[in-house]
């Protein structure tokens, strides 16, 4: 995720981290998506430390469990 901030104070990283925090909080409150995909902890957050003003980047690393499909070719053997 990235944000663009032209201000001279080089504080755009705060905006990027604010967005990451809001996404993180949303994932904690709703760890299952469409009754299929379940969040697996931990969630890792990172941000770009090198100067790239006026562009600021941050990210979340998440892992998800997905449903295991049933094999239809062996269903008659059960």
Image: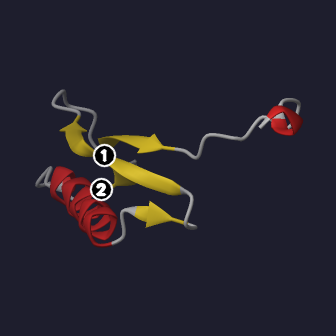
Q: Earlier in the sequence, mark 1 or mark 2?
A: 2
Q: Would residue 46 appear left or right of 2 to someone viewing this image?
A: left
- Give the answer, above or below, for where 61 lies relative to 21: above
The residue furthest top is 50
Q: Secondary structure at mark 1?
A: loop
Whether residue 35 is visible here, answered yes or no, is: yes
Residue 49 location, x and y as percent? Answer: 15, 31
Q: Quadrant of residue 20?
A: bottom left
What color scheme is it?
A: secondary structure
Q: Quadrant of residue 25?
A: bottom left
Q: Secondary structure at mark 2?
A: loop
Q: Residues within 10 Å of mark 2 (few under 14, many from 20)?
A: few
Between 6 and 4, the residue placed more toward the observer is: 4
CA gap, disc 1 and disc 2: 5 Å
Question: Mark 1 near mark 2, Cβ–Cβ under 8 Å?
Answer: yes
Report which residue position mark 1 lands on: 54
Between 24 and 50, the residue placed more toward the observer is: 24
Residue 66's tag is none
Rendered residue at 26%/40% (across/down): 53
């Amino acid at each position: 995720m990235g944000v663009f901030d032209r201000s001279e104070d080089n504080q755009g990283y705060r905006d990027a981290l604010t967005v990451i925090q809001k996404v993180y909080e949303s994932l904690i409150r709703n760890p299952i998506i469409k009754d299929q995909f379940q969040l697996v902890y931990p969630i890792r957050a990172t941000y770009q430390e090198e100067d790239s003003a006026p562009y600021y980047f941050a990210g979340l690393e998440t892992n998800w469990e997905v449903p295991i499909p049933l094999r239809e070719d062996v269903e008659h053997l059960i």
